[in-house]
């Protein structure tokens, strides 16, 4: 899982989140990684067999790769490989407009996790209100 750890490392460097994410895969056999040749960009996905959909856990592209269409290309590659990526797991510091441009405009929760989806799914709570507060 060296490449997965590299993706987490890049994510933590780029994230404005006040804590570092860690790699904690409960089912490594259902995890896939899409990465750039130089390991400076990548997407970490997992498959929800009980739900029949793929979820992006982490997506990161270093500052040299921003705006080059690598995320869109990664999504297209996944689709061509038969992966139905229905969910994006996000935190409050993630850039949701990027995902909205790709069609992930339904916001909700799955347990304690914030999710974006590209369609309404019956196992996502879309009634949850999420707001970012600015402490003065």
Image: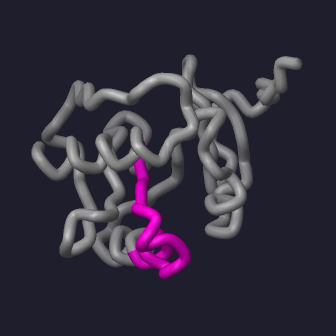
Where 36 falls versus 90 (above or below)? below
Left or right position of 4 against 15? left
Residue drawn at (69%, 68%), measured in percent from left and top? 101
Where 41 falls versus 94 (above or below)? below
Left or right position of 58 against 126? left
In the rendered view of the protein, which quadrant contains the N terminus?
top left
Residue 76 seen in the current view: yes
Q: Quadrant of residue 100?
A: bottom right
Residue drawn at (23%, 53%), measured in percent from left and top? 32
Residue drawn at (46%, 69%), measured in percent from left and top? 71
Q: Is residue 70 magenta?
A: yes
Q: Is residue 91 magenta?
A: no
In percent of width and height, residue 74 lies at: 38, 71
Where 104 falls versus 16 (above or below)? below
In percent of width and height, residue 6 lies at: 22, 48
Q: Which residues are magenta?
A: 57-73
In percent of width and height, residue 76 lies at: 42, 77
Residue nearest the viewer, comparing 53 with 98: 98
Q: Quadrant of residue 110?
A: top right
């Amino acid at each position: 899982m060296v490449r997965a750890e590299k993706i987490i490392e890049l994510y933590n460097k780029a994230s404005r989140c006040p804590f570092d994410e860690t790699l904690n895969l409960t089912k490594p056999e259902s995890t896939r990684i899409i990465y750039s040749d130089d390991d400076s960009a990548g997407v970490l996905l997992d498959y929800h067999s009980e739900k029949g959909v793929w979820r992006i856990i982490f997506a990161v592209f270093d500052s040299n790769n921003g705006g080059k269409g690598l995320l869109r290309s990664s999504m297209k590659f996944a689709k061509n490989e038969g992966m139905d990526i229905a969910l994006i797991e996000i935190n409050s510091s993630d850039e949701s407009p990027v995902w909205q441009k790709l069609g992930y405009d339904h916001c909700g929760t799955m347990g304690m996790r914030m999710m974006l989806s590209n369609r309404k799914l019956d196992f996502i709570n879309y009634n949850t209100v999420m707001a970012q507060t600015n402490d003065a």
